[in-house]
Every structure is written in C-alpha cells, then in structure tokens.
Image (cartoon, helix red, strand yellow):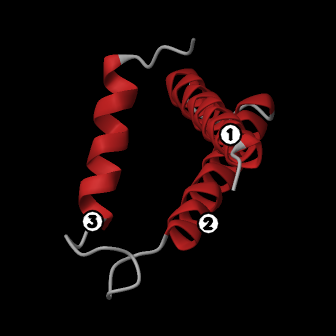
Amino acid sequence: MTTIPALRAAQALAVYQSTDTGQPAGQGGQDFGSLLSQSVNGAIATGNVAETQALSALSGGGDLTQVVTAVSQAELALQTTVAVRDRVLQAYQDIIKMSI
C-alpha cells in the first residue's frame, strides 16, 4: 500500500483545482490524456531544473539549498509519476479480468 504525505496530497489537490473546469471531460473540460501529458511534462521540467541546479553547484556556483530543493522536487515528481503509472496499470489489469 502506498501512502501519500500530506504535503504531496495538498500539492496534487492544488494542481487538480487549478486545472479543473467543473465540467466532465469531453464537454469542454480537460480530458485524462492531456492532464496526464501535462503532468509528465511537468515532471520532466522539474528533472531538468534539478539537473541544471546540480551542474551549477558542481561548477562552483549555485546555492546548496536550492540544489537540494530542486532534487527533492524532482524525486517527488518521479515518485508521483511511478505511483500514477502503477495505478493505471492496476486499473487496466482489473478491466482485462472483467467478464463481458
């Protein structure tokens, strides 16, 4: 069982609320595919920021606190992406097991 820390849950809720139009998907709202795409692109961008911060610190510039923060955010984004992937695969497997 995966537990979600309160901070991560609050961040996910804030992202959801900022993208929620109050309409079901297909009626002018955002569909699952585009939401997933935006989330993956955000995770990639977070990883790129962390990499840039780390390279800056290795070359003698940058603040160590910023590097640690950027790497922690990238790790959190990766963990969230993996958790979503696992849930999607589990849902797919459950659907496959259903009898028609």
Query: Identity of the amino acid at label 3?
Result: Asp
* Residue 92, image x, y percentages: 71, 47
Label 3, label 2: how far apart the Cα atoms are: 15 Å
* Dots 2, 1 in contact, CB < 8 A: no
Q: Residue drawn 60% across and 29% down?
A: 67
Image spot of residue 48 (x, y percent):
71, 51
* Badge number at residue 20: 3
Name the residue carrying label 1: 94
Return the disc, 3 or 2, that comes first in the chain's sequence: 3
First along the sequence among labels 1 and 3: 3
Amino acid type at mark 1: Asp
Disc 1 on helix, strand or loop?
A: helix
Q: Are marks 3 and 2 in contact (CB under 8 Å)?
A: no
Q: How much space separates mark 2 and mark 1, taking CA atoms? A: 23 Å
| Residue plotted at (57% across, 11% down) | 1
Rendered residue at 32%/54% (across/down): 16
Q: Nearer the viewer, mark 2 or mark 1?
A: 1
Callout 2, which amino acid?
Ser
**Compared to 28, does 92 lie above or below?**
above
